[in-house]
């Protein structure tokens, strides 16, 4: 398989952007909060409602019997109203990821109203601002302000409207159905959030009290916090599968809690895709509902992002993980940082200073700590001390594995500047491979091979220097330097690919 890396030219605009530096966000409010004015910054309606409903839920668990039929109805209505938010408020109105016929629009509007999370226009305006200004001060529920703030805190305070980023909702303002819901939302919320679930349980099996406290109040608390987890947990738990510029993450647990909205990294990278989960085994009932509606003619034009671009994002993040892992590994001293020796200095270090060095492709390697670990035994390794072992290492004696080549890179100590070059000995490089061969007798004397065992034929070495008179110097500093320049040019051209 080819290992050639394609060079993909890109403009600055096309190149992927790295994560922005994480700084400290400015204060929530334009004026300081003091002991005397704190109450002005509280959204009292939201605060009383969002804390009152959990308190009532705890009260009901302690004092009111939960009938099996009421429990089943509460779970069913939880899913129905939750899907009204995820398939309606979110994927249809906020992102326009598919087209819905009027009957489906009315059904999703009513069910979403039963989740009591504001009108579609209000909800979608905040969500579009969240996508446009993710993780900044203009993000209405920025994850950089902490888990509690993005989950619940942002609804408990009154921030100046100028501090929330702009988002265009002209299409929603021009929708008569949404204008009706926006104008009379308290009535929609009362009827769908409290009256309907109570009536079903009361008229159905006589459990009026259980219908109100469990199918209405307790169910509402669970729907609220399931949705709120998309703003908090989905920005904290999981993997950055497709992009790491912002905080959204993918995780099965968040998807389980949020009716499929937990593959949030995918959603932020490809927001107009009607799916959150793209794999068959990933949990996304909202996607399944939209797909089913398309089969029966209630939905159409289900938008999907090109698979080619989705795969690019995934590969990019996989490369990021690999690169991060590479940074933890020892790759040896870079060649361009190695000291440069002449061939004479290389030989002198071995003869006079006892260095256990070998030479391969102009690079000097110190193998003194590898003798006892060498799989081929000490003798073959010792036979290469002071020699150019390029040919021997690459097949003349043994064609070493890639694992051995990786290990070799950690043993670099120098570059040999004037290594004898390949050729016929006259320096023009047009002959057969040129080497200074040691005689069999010299090798056997040096290594003391058992009688009858053939010793390997070495390359340029200190036991056989008579051929060095014919070699032509090849300045390796220049050769490696040019290689480094080419490498840098390739890197620059490949940035962001």
Image (cartoon, rainbow, N blue to C red):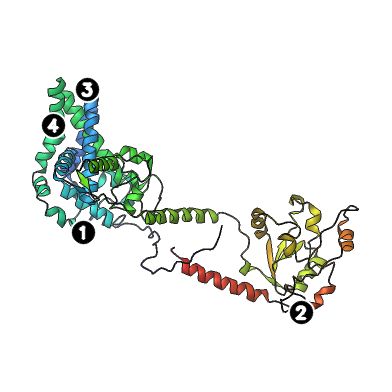
In space, the residues marked 3 and 4 are separated at their CA atoms by 15 Å
Pointer 2: residues within 10 angstroms few (<14), some, or many (20+)? some
In space, the residues marked 4 and 2 are separated at their CA atoms by 98 Å
**Badge 4 element:** helix
Q: Position of residue 227 (x, y in %)?
A: 26, 41
First of labels 3, 4 by sequence position: 3
Judged by depth in the image, the label closer to the viewer, 3 or 2, is 2
Give the residue pinned by disc 4: 196
Residue at the (77%, 61%) spot, across then down: 356
Q: Is residue 93 visible?
A: yes
First of labels 1, 3 by sequence position: 3
Q: Where the N terminus falls, by quadrant? A: bottom right
Judged by depth in the image, the label closer to the viewer, 4 or 2, is 2
Residue at the (25%, 30%) spot, across then down: 75
Circle 3/circle 2 CB separation < 8 Å? no
First of labels 4, 1 by sequence position: 1
Q: On the rendered structure, is 448 left or right of 475?
A: right
Asked whether 380 or 42 is in front, the reply is: 380
First of labels 4, 2 by sequence position: 4
Q: Position of residue 465 (x, y in %)?
A: 83, 71
Asked whether 394 or 55 is in front, the reply is: 394
In space, the residues marked 1 and 2 are separated at their CA atoms by 76 Å
When asked about the image quadrant of residue 342, the answer is: bottom right
Residue at the (40%, 55%) spot, across then down: 313
The numbered dot on residue 426 is 2
Q: Is residue 30 visible?
A: no
First of labels 1, 2 by sequence position: 1
Q: Is residue 66 above or below residue 496?
A: above
Give the residue pinned by disc 3: 69
**Badge 2 element:** loop
Judged by depth in the image, the label closer to the viewer, 1 or 3, is 3
Give the residue pinned by disc 1: 166
């Amino acid at each position: 398989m080819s290992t050639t890396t394609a060079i993909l030219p890109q403009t600055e605009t096309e190149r992927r952007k790295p994560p922005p530096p994480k700084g400290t966000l400015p204060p929530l409010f334009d004026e300081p909060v003091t002991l005397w004015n704190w109450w002005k910054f509280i959204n009292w309606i939201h605060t009383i409602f969002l804390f009152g409903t959990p308190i009532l839920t705890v009260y009901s668990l302690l004092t009111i019997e939960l009938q099996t039929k009421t429990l089943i109805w509460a779970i069913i209505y939880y899913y129905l109203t939750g899907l009204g938010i995820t398939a309606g408020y979110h994927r249809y109105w906020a992102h326009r990821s598919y087209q819905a016929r009027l009957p489906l629009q009315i059904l999703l509007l009513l069910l979403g109203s039963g989740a009591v999370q504001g009108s579609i226009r209000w909800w979608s305006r905040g969500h579009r601002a969240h996508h446009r200004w993710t993780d900044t001060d203009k993000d209405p529920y920025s994850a950089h302000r902490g888990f509690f703030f993005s989950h619940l805190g942002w609804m408990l305070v009154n921030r100046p409207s100028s501090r929330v980023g702009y988002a265009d909702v002209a299409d929603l303002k021009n929708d008569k159905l949404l204008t009706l819901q926006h104008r009379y939302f308290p009535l929609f919320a009362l009827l769908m959030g409290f009256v309907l679930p109570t009536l079903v349980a009361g008229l159905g099996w006589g459990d009026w009290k259980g219908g109100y406290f469990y199918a209405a109040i307790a169910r509402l608390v669970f729907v609220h916090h399931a949705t709120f987890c998309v703003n908090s947990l989905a920005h904290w738990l999981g993997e950055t599968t497709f992009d790491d510029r912002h905080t959204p993450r993918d995780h099965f647990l968040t998807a389980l809690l949020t009716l499929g909205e937990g593959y949030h990294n995918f959603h932020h990278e490809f927001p107009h895709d009607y799916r959150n989960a793209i794999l068959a085994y990933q949990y996304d009932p909202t996607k399944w509902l939209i797909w089913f509606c398309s089969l029966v003619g209630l939905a159409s034009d289900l938008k999907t992002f090109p698979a080619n671009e989705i795969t690019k994002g995934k590969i990019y993040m996989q490369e990021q993980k690999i690169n991060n892992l590479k940074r933890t590994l020892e790759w040896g001293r870079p060649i361009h940082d190695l000291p440069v020796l002449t061939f004479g200095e290389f030989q002198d270090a071995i003869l006079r200073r006892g260095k256990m060095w070998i030479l391969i492709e102009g690079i000097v390697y110190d193998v003194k700590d590898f003798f006892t670990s060498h799989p081929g035994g000490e003798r073959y390794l010792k036979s290469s001390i002071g020699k150019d072992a390029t040919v021997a290492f690459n097949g003349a004696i043994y064609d070493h594995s890639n694992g051995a080549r990786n290990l070799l890179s950690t043993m670099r100590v120098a570059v040999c500047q004037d290594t004898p070059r390949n050729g016929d000995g006259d320096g023009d490089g047009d002959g057969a491979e040129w080497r200074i061969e040691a005689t069999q007798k010299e090798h056997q004397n040096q290594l003391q091979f058992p009688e009858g065992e053939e010793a390997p034929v070495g390359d340029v070495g200190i036991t056989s220097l008579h051929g060095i008179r014919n070699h032509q110097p090849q300045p390796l500093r220049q050769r490696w330097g040019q290689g480094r320049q080419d490498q840098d040019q390739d890197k620059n051209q490949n940035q962001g690919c």
